[in-house]
Each structure stands twice: as structure tokens, then as C-alpha cells.
Image (cartoon, rainbow, N blue to C red):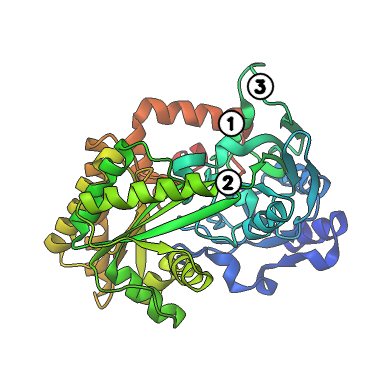
Amino acid sequence: MYNCVSERDAEYLRSAVSPERVLFRGDIAPDYGHDELGGITSMPDILVKVTSADEISEVMKYASGRNLPVVVRGSGTGLVGGSVALHGGIMLETVLMNRILELDEENLTVTVQPGVLLMDLAAYCEEHGLLYPPDPGEKSATIGGNISTNAGGMRAVKYGVTRDYVRGLTVVLADGSVQKLGGKIVKNSTGYSLMNLMIGSEGTLGIIAEAVLKLVPLPQVTKSLLVPFGSAEDGISAVPGIIKSRASLTAIEFFERDTVLFAEDYLGKKFPDTRSPAYLLLTVDGSDAAYVDSELDHVAQLCLDLGACDAYLVDTDERKESVWKARGAFLEAIKASTTEMDECDVVVPRSRVADFIKYTHSVAAELGIRIPSFGHAGDGNLHIYICRDDLPSDVWKKKLGKAFDLMYEKAGSMGGTVSGEHGIGFAKMEYMERACGSRQTQIMEGIKKAFDPAGILNPGKLFRPWTDQNE
């Protein structure tokens, strides 16, 4: 197991980094003991606010020599305990590494530090007529966190996920060595893709210190349709037909009226329409206004043919702000509507989204609990929230476990899996092992040992490390 952390460790790190950026135990704010959902709590012994790859390297060399666990934290917006220091030890916070280092308009890349916020990068690129396509709902997340979980978001239907836009990474390994993986090159078939192993590894293989990201030209026109349906089943059942039509859509989002009402209460702002039980939010972008309008007309008529009640053009600034602010607040709004909740970040083939949503309704009825949902219907990634409300603790835990068992088993039977974009962390570890099976889990453990032989990087995440198994 790991060595115990002492004041002497903090003193060394203060000398190696900077005294004011190293905090010890009681000086660390409680917020560093949990992530966004707050269901998993554990405080680090030492918090180090790093500003460079060299500082990360120094900390890792020391931690490796002392056999101390290390966890990396960005904005703390995760939902599965991925940035919680389960074993105490050292927490590296990267939010001060928030510089955009270079815009290369010839290669269409931007080089950033890991603490750059998604919303800041998006605004910077737009100012230069460019687009960084990944668009997760949590805009205050850091790029390092997005890469660590391979975040997706609303534009994944057309543009793909974070992995598709990472060209190069500078990472610090468990022994403190600094490695450059990939770069500005478009192609690379030189050995195993170690860079791609880092993407989605949730800080268990290395620490991201810098990233080279691919950009695309900023679409000149972006328009959306808000499409109400008479039932959730009608709304979500329309998605396969929309996809089959091969319309050039950027986003296909699904949500129900209750979620919209939660957002209205949370934001204190009215949504354009709350009369219908379910909605699709469809987006088209492009360089030609006539093309975008033609696609929207085609999709609007298709939705009406598939049973939609209407199709509203989200064209005015007021309507855009109302719709997209509400969509961005869905998670917080649902969280504010209950005493406690947990998330099922399931992904299934797009053709099975309707079946899965219907199944969540049957689970809610069977267990007598509230399960609101919304999600990226266009790529099969649904965000389903199990709400505690007024349930006693023991009843809540039993029903929560049963709900997860039922929904993840159903997802697997449909050809899906347990996480589309939020990662595994600690909360979904058991379900990942079930989904992947023993052989794939063994392979992942072998990769972990190759990068981090002592198991000091983010221990207790993704799968139970050998340091726990040998206790």
C-alpha cells in the first residue's frame, strides 16, 4: 500500500513548487473532497496548484519515490468520482494552467494547457473564425478533463467526440518523465498509439500537461428547430427515421417536459413551449444559408410526417438564449429538484434509443422512483437520473442499485455499454467490469501496470487496482 503523508511531504513540495500553492490537510477547502454530484467524498492530504509541466514532473518524481497516491483535478465537474482522492495523498489541480499557447492557422490547430475552460476555448476560436467542435453540456469543464473522459456533447452527431480532435499531447508519467505523443501531424502509424490510450484514461496512465487540438472553419450559419411531440415515445421513436433520412444534422437532442419545467424553475426564465410531453432539438450548420434553410425545411416536414405536433424555428436571439440556456442547465435543474441523485450515462445503438427510453419508464414504475432523462439521441448517449426525493437512505440505496443493474443489463443486451462520455471513475467501476469481461479488464490492468507500475496515479478508478486486491 501507500505511505502515509506527513507535514514533511508538504514542506518538500512547497520548496519544489511554491509555498502559497501547496496546502496541507485542514487548509484544503471541503469542495476538493467531491465532484459535481457529491455522492463520493474523500479529502486529499496535500493540494498542489501546478502551473507547468515541469512542476507536475517534480511532484510526480517525489510521489513516485515516496510511493504516494496522486489524483488530478480540473474544475471538478465530473459525475463519477473520477477526481476524488479516494486514498488521500496528493491532489494536483491544473486550473492555473489555463493558457492558450498557440493558434496555428496553417495547420488548423490550437495548443492549450489542460486548465483552459471549454467555454473560453470556444470563444477564442470563434473570434478567429474557427470552431473546436466538441460541445459537452458543461462549458466550465477544463480541456484536460474533457480529454481524460473523451467527452462528446451535442455536436457529436456531425463532428464526433473529443478523441477525434486531439492531435498531440504532452503528458507526465508516474515516474515524472515528460513525454510528447503525436503532434500537429494528420497521420501517424508509428507503433502503438500511446496518445489514444491517454484519451479517456481518466488520469490513471499519465497527467496531461499540454494538448494540440484540431480545429475546423467556423460555420457561417447555424439554425435549430424545437420540435414538440405528443408523447415521449413519439418523440424518441422519430429519431431513427430522422437519422435514416440522412439529413445533415449537427445535433439531435431529446428531453421531456418535466426536465424543461425543472430548468424554468432553476433559471427563473420561461421556455418557448412547455405544452408538450416531449421535444427534439435539431440543429443544422453550414457555410451556405440557402442550404441550411433547405435542410431545416426538409427536417421540419419529416418530423411532422413522423408525428410531431409542430416545428418551431429557433431563430431570434431571445429564443436561442432561452432554448440553449435551458438545455445547458438540465443537469443542475434536475439536481436541484431532488435531495440526491445518481446518473446512468448509458450509450446504445441509435436505433435502440426509443426502446431504452421506454424501458427507463418501466423501471421507474416498477421501483416507484422518479427517473427523468435527456440526452444526445443522435448518437445514442442518454443521461438518465435516478432521484432519491424523500426515500429513506436504506431504501434509496437498494432501489438505486436495482435501477443500475436493470438499466446496464438492458443496455448490454441492446449492444450498448455503461458510459458514453462521462467516464467510469469510481462510481461505475463494477459495471465496467461486467460490461468488458475479465479478459478485457486484465488487458487494461496490464496497460495500467506498464504506465504506472506502483499504481500511484488515480488509484481506485476504472477497475480495482492490484494495490487494493492484495490488501
Disc 1 crowd rating (10 Å Cα; few below 14, some 14-19, many 20+) is some
The residue located at (28%, 47%) in the rendering is: 302
| Percent x, y of residue 218 | 64, 47
Residue ID for mark 3: 187
x 27%, y 41%: residue: 240
The N terminus: image quadrant? top right
Q: Residue 350 is drawn in which quadrant?
A: top left
Q: Amino acid at mark 2?
A: Pro
Q: Nearer the viewer, residue 49 or 347?
A: 347
Residue that sits furthest to the left in the current view: 366
Instruction: Single out the mark in the foreground, 3 or 2.
Output: 2
Q: Viewer-proximal residue, 185 or 27? A: 185
Label 2 secondary element: loop
Q: Earlier in the sequence, mark 1 or mark 3?
A: 3
Tell which residue pokes out farthest to the front in this image: 290
Question: Could you give the CA–CA distance between mark 3 and mark 2, rounded to whole angstroms?
Answer: 20 Å
Instruction: Let me know if residue 397 appears in the view.
Output: yes
Count of numbered circles in the view? 3
Distance of mark 1 from mark 3, alpha carbons?
Answer: 13 Å
Name the N-terminal-most of marks 3 and 2.
2
Residue at numbered disc 1: 196
Label 2 packing within 10 angstroms: few (<14), some (14-19), many (20+): many
Q: Name the spot of residue 158 as percent of width and height, x first.
A: 47, 40
Q: Amino acid at mark 3?
A: Lys
Q: Which residue is denoted by mark 2 in the rendering? A: 133
Give the Cα separation between the discs numbered 1 and 2: 18 Å
Marks 1/3 in contact by CB < 8 Å: the verdict is no
Residue 11 horizontal side relative to residue 166, left or right: right
Q: Amino acid at mark 1?
A: Asn
